[in-house]
Amino acid sequence: MELILKYFPDLSAEQRAQFEALYGLYEDWNAKINVVSRKDFDQLYLRHVLHSLAIAKVCRFEAGAEVLDVGCGGGFPSIPLAILFPEVKFVAADSIRKKITVVEGVAKGLGLKNIEPRWGRVEEINRHFDYVVSRAVTAMPEFVGWIWHKIRRGEKGSLPNGILYLKGGDLAEELALTGMPWQLFDISDYFEEEFFETKKVVYTKK
């Protein structure tokens, strides 16, 4: 929890309580449905919560913005972002039912009203969003094919509407295959922990 306050010191009392509650909630759910690797569960705040919040260092969403998390797994990055941006609406989608069960349980445990867990393939979601976020679910050309038509033009945050994608390693070749312009933000510019050295937020606007 100290790690979150180190980089986000202006949290409200409710937000602090929600971030503090994450560990216990995920511990309970992970014992039933394994969505966070057991070998790094003790690093939950570093490798999952803070990693998710790197998106917030790159783009601040405005109140009323609508954000789709594709392949959300157990709720990353959408649950930490939903705590940080209570006035923003999130849809957390995954094709694996048990993962959505965890998202439902954690969101209920936190009292989050601004996140809608959604079970199913992203292609079946017939709605438009301001931003799409994700954490390394598939190769970028395939990902863009799934979601590009679901993003509406505009600017509902500190960056124009578009994709904000958490990914690590050398991405040049993969991004070039999309034929689109991308901006890469090094997470190590925002967080000093060694874990983030090779990790990036990858962005393109609609």
Image (tube, rainbow, N blue to C red):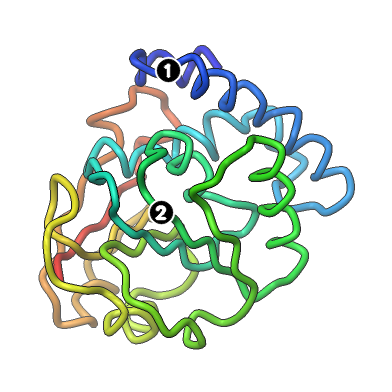
Which residue is painted at 60% across and 61% down in the image?
117
- Quarter that holds the C terminus: bottom left
Vertically, is 21 above or below 146?
above
Badge 1 amino acid: Ser
Indicate left or right for 192 with 203 as reference: right
Which residue is painted at 43% across and 60% down in the image?
134
Q: Callout 2 environment at 10 Å: few (<14), some (14 to 19), or many (20+)?
A: many
Q: Quadrant of residue 154?
A: bottom left
Q: Callout 1 environment at 10 Å: few (<14), some (14 to 19), or many (20+)?
A: few
Vertically, is 136 above or below 59?
below
Indicate left or right for 42 with 64 as reference: right
- Judged from the image, the secondary structure of the residue bearing numbered disc 2 is strand
Q: Along the line of sight, which residue is nearer the eye, 41 or 82?
A: 82
- The residue singled out by tag 1 in the image is 12
Label whose residue precedes the other's in the sequence (2 or 1): 1
- The residue singled out by tag 2 in the image is 89
Q: Position of residue 197 (x, y in %)?
A: 35, 36
**Number of numbered markers:** 2
- Quarter that holds the N terminus: top right
Which residue is painted at 75% across and 59% down in the image?
101
Q: Along the line of sight, which residue is nearer the eye, 126 or 72?
A: 126
Q: Position of residue 143 (x, y in %)?
A: 38, 77
- Judged from the image, the secondary structure of the residue bearing numbered disc 1 is loop
Badge 2 amino acid: Lys
